[in-house]
Amino acid sequence: MIEAFSLEFMQNALMAGILASIACGMIGSLVVVNRQVFLAGGIAHSAYGGIGLAFFLGLPVLPTTLGFTLAAAGIMALITLKKPQQSDTIIGVLWAAGMATGIILIDITPGYNVDLMSYLFGSILTVPQNDLWIMLVLIVVIFLVITLLYRQFLLLSFEPEFARTQGVPVALLHFVQLAMVAVSVVMIIQVVGLILVIALLSIPPYLAGQRARSLFTMMIMASLWSMAFCTIGLILSYQFDLTTGATIIAVATVTFFIVLSIRALLAK
């Protein structure tokens, strides 16, 4: 197995998994404590429209998908602020619209030969080194934003009404938070694909939340859980010739149910 990691594509895959795990730990924790998993799902699936647009216009996939997903996240942030009662329905519509737009654009792209499965279930073994540098820059930006606004995010997550009375710019933070979700989703799509991205944004933070005593600790523990899932999934997929993204999520899901079972037994 050690020989496998001497291969450049395996080294890139491992690094992509680690970088995506850091994003999952930071942003996934905010998603879970703010109960925004469905909203994150809408952003993730709307990203497919960006992938379709990139192929249709012949543009670089990662930057184009990032721009498209940020725009979709901005619309969803506006809807959840202005029309919270209707947000579930409208997010569901945008979720489907993004997917449909992406599929249609790829269908009508001249010389269509895109491997849809690599975007639906991830293509961590084909992540180029240039994308790793982009991922690193995006993670540094997310880290700086969370570090600078940590107290405000903490108040928004656990005491939203108190945050308003303290003059915290709740609406602005909501937009910033969903923009970071969009950035993280685009990174994670390369690792596990857009269908499975929600699992990596929710399972590690949930497991971390069972033991963590602060949001900061939860982010670190969620990142470590996610790194473990990505590394073990990568090794198992290589050994048994399985789809890597699906194997990573299978490892996370099995661990999730084992932890739940142990907790249930201890509670008796």
Image: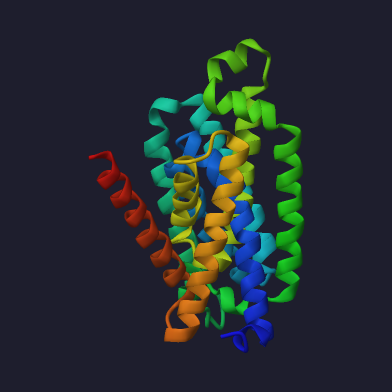
Which picture quadrant has residue 163?
top right
**Camera-side residue: 20 or 173?**
20
In this rendering, the answer to whether 135 lies above or below 84 is below
Can see residue 208?
yes
In this rendering, the answer to whether 85 lies above or below 256 is above
In this rendering, the answer to whether 161 lies above or below 89 is above
- At 44% from the left and 51% from the top, the residue drawn is 203
- At 39% from the left and 26% from the top, the residue drawn is 85
Which picture quadrant has residue 243?
bottom left
Colour pattern: rainbow
Can see residue 241?
no
Residue 64's spot in the image, x, y percent? 66, 61
Residue extending farthest left: 268
Q: Image quadrant for the C terminus?
A: top left
- At 51% from the left and 49% from the top, the residue drawn is 43
Residue 255's spot in the image, x, y percent? 39, 59
Residue 67's spot in the image, x, y percent? 66, 53
Q: Image quadrant for the N terminus?
A: bottom right
- At 45% from the left and 59% from the top, the residue drawn is 99
